[in-house]
Image: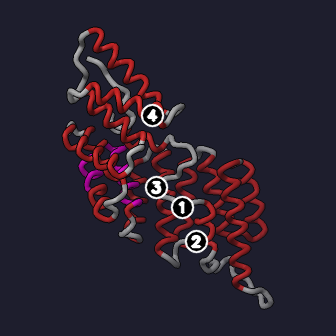
Amino acid sequence: MTRYNAPMTSPPALFRLALSRPAIFRGAVSALALATLVAALPASAAERKPAPHAAPDREAVERARQAASCLQMAEKTPKAAFESALTWQDRGGGDMARLCQAMALFHQGQFQASATRLEDLVPTLGKDTPEGASSLLARAGWAWLRAGDSDKAEKAYTAAIDRSPRDPELLVDRAFARAESERYWDAIEDLNRAIGMAPKRAEPYLYRAGAFRALGNDSKALEDVGVALALEPGNPEALLLRGNLRAVTGNPDGAKSDWRSVMRIDPDTTSAKAASDNLARLQGAEAEGKPPAK
């Protein structure tokens, strides 16, 4: 029986694939957007100081500028950013400096420490707007996932959803956490809700297809991946998944076509390598007269 590399279909690797994407922090806005969001909030009581001659708008702009600079550094040179944020905190940077420390720890791979610090910031940086709190909690959830603690990740995402219940991204994120615990029906429930809120987005259909595949429902998986590709025709992950599904449902020519498309559209990636390996396995199986694996 031939086995196909399926980073989008073998449980719970469907959702783990996204964890390895460089430069993607799922469920979270960019560093600049985060800095602007939380820096515009009122300073915490511990940070408020009399400044009779300072213009509040200018102070907010400067806080946002410093935060954006630090958060961008955290992505590129996290160790240096962490040290810089410690110095900034000593000089009165307060919660914004602590936020930068948390993000620097994340980009260093210290996910548990990052998640804990992000959650600790919610009562202060997230107290004034639901968006601020849910953004911090979404980051904490992703850090918990990277730390391998899907239970804490789900709790963080649930808290984020409680504050921003109409955000489909948060539902997709919680689906990741639930799938990591192999709770595929719970993941599908979240993805159903995300699709109801954003029916023209390909991603929830793609992930729901992977969940159905993990449950052994290839017909539903094919249906969903077809919708994903109708919405986003060149999506390499969707093409890879459809190729895998076609290979095990009696459509080898369709599988080969999809895998070759992945290799052409998205070369030098995990998806392209999986597609290349699967193509070689299928061709080898055909040469030996073996049936494809389910």
Q: How many marks?
A: 4
| Residue that label 2 marks | 37
Work out whether residue 183 can be spotted.
no
**Mark earlier in primary sequence (1, 4):** 1
Work out whether residue 142 can be spotted.
yes
Asked which quadrant contains residue 60, the reply is bottom right
Q: Would you say the magenta stretch is mainly helix, strand or loop?
A: helix
Highlighted magenta segment, given as a residue range: 169-189
Compared across the picture, whether 100 is left or right of 124 comes to right
Q: Is residue 212 above or below residue 40?
A: above
Compared across the picture, whether 64 is left or right of 26 comes to right
Asked which quadrant contains residue 274, the reply is top left
| Residue that label 4 marks | 271
**Mark earlier in primary sequence (4, 3):** 3
Q: Nearer the viewer, mark 1 or mark 4?
A: 4
| Mark pair 1, 3: CA separation | 14 Å
Query: Which mark is on residue 29?
Result: 1
Query: Residue drawn at (68%, 70%), measured in percent from left and top?
Result: 64
| Mark pair 4, 2: CA separation | 34 Å
Q: Nearer the viewer, residue 106 or 199?
A: 199
Q: Nearer the viewer, residue 196 or 229?
A: 229
Compared across the picture, whether 233 is left or right of 249 comes to right
